[in-house]
């Protein structure tokens, strides 16, 4: 369903595209920088997925800079706007009506109000039955996004890819990108008994009920075991996928706030996501892309590719996954 006209005679699909479906190929080095050349709009009628940026990095405990993440991921996504998504072998935009909803705007001089503003920004998306795909920003943004999701769906099953568990115990009102899943479990926003954390390379002996699969486990057992563990833990419950780019090894994704050696390749990440088609996904995000620490846009491209694969995941029918496994 790729729209059939020359990119050099049209351009700026972010504003000028007529159909929400299909892919319009444009030069990667020019044009309006919406995510994957989707149309900029706040009109949610008939929309399946709204991509939104949350340029927030005031909760970091190490290197700041993720406020520039949404812009960098949008820019890097132009490299992916030419047709079918590998290795899914279909164009998710033939199946999904996706828009770029723009960025959440807030006053950094009033930091205590920002979590409520993020929650209020995403609330209409959930209320319209649209799936938000949020681009961060530091990982704290997932907390208000989950709060909004839980108001619509009840306690959420969390699928969490990261080097850090982000469940360290903390005071109730502190804003920190390493404690929000502790608070989410404590407040009943997440359902830890049907949630899973994957790729952990830091130590916290308290799991707070989450299933935790360490980096050692994943390296030893492999991607098929990871897929099985996620599917068996989450089942068909409403789930939220959050992907911190520091799940990837710093050699793959150097542009992040708290890199940890011993991580994973992009192929391993894609292989896991490709096995999860058919889940009941109600929200998702990619966080912690920090352009000031990136090299040659490696991490921004990784973030854009992960976001593209999340779109493929929610548009994949179970037969796509089964056919993939049969081919292997």
Image: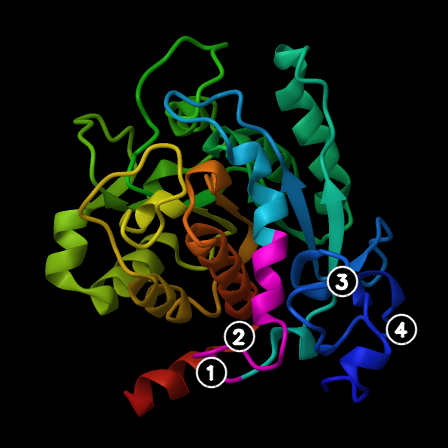
| Local secondary structure at mark 4 | loop
Mark 4 = which residue?
Answer: 18
Measure how far apart labels 4 and 1 are at the Cα level: 29 Å
Residue at the spot 53% in from the left edge and 20% down from the top edge: 58
Q: Can you tell which quarter of the image residue 124 is in?
A: top right
* Residue bearing mark 2: 316
Q: How many circles with numbers are drawn on the protein?
A: 4
Distance in Å between CA atoms under marks 2 and 4: 25 Å
Answer yes or no: is residue 159 visible: no
Q: What whole-number distance in Å separates the C-alpha atoms at marks 3 and 4? A: 16 Å
Q: Which dot marks residue 177? A: none
Q: Magenta residues?
A: 74-89
Q: State the image coordinates of residue 20 (x, y, percent, origin top left).
A: 80, 70
CB within 8 Å, label 2 to label 1: yes
Q: Nearer the viewer, mark 3 or mark 4?
A: 3
Question: What residue is at 82 percent from the left and 63 percent from the top?
Answer: 46
Side of 207 relative to 23 (left or right): left
Q: Are marks 2 and 4 in contact (CB under 8 Å)?
A: no
Q: Nearer the viewer, mark 2 or mark 4?
A: 4
* Discs 4/1, front: 4
- In this rendering, the answer to whether 310 lies above or below 156 is below
Task: Reply above or below: 96 against 300.
Answer: below
């Amino acid at each position: 369903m790729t729209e059939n006209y020359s990119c050099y005679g049209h351009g700026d699909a972010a504003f000028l595209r007529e159909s929400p479906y299909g892919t319009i190929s444009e030069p990667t080095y020019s044009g309006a920088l919406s995510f994957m050349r989707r149309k900029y709009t706040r009109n949610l009628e008939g929309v399946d997925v709204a991509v939104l940026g949350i340029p927030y990095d005031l909760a970091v405990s190490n290197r700041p800079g993720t406020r520039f993440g949404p812009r960098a991921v949008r820019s890097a996504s132009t490299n992916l706007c030419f047709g079918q998504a590998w290795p899914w072998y279909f164009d998710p935009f033939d199946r999904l009506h996706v828009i770029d909803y723009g960025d959440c705007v807030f006053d950094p001089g009033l930091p205590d109000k920002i979590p409520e503003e993020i929650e209020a920004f995403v609330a209409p998306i959930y209320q319209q039955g649209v799936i938000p795909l949020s681009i961060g920003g530091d990982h704290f943004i997932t907390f208000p996004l989950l709060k909004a999701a839980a108001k619509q769906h009840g306690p959420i099953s969390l699928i969490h890819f990261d080097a850090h568990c982000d469940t360290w115990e903390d005071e109730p009102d502190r804003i920190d990108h390493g404690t929000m899943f502790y608070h989410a479990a404590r407040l009943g926003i997440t359902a830890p008994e049907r949630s899973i954390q994957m790729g952990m390379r830091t130590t916290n002996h308290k799991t707070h009920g989450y299933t935790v699969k360490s980096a050692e486990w994943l390296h030893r057992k492999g991607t098929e075991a990871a897929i099985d563990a996620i599917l068996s833990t989450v089942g068909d419950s409403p789930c939220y996928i959050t992907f911190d780019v520091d799940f990837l090894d710093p050699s793959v994704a150097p542009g992040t706030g708290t890199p940890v050696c011993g991580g994973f390749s992009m192929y391993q990440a894609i292989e896991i996501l490709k096995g999860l088609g058919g889940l009941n996904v109600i929200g998702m995000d990619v966080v912690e892309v920090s352009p000031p620490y990136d090299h040659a846009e490696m991490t921004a491209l990784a973030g854009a590719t992960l976001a593209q694969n999340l779109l493929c995941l929610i548009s994949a029918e179970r037969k796509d996954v089964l056919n993939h496994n049969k081919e292997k």
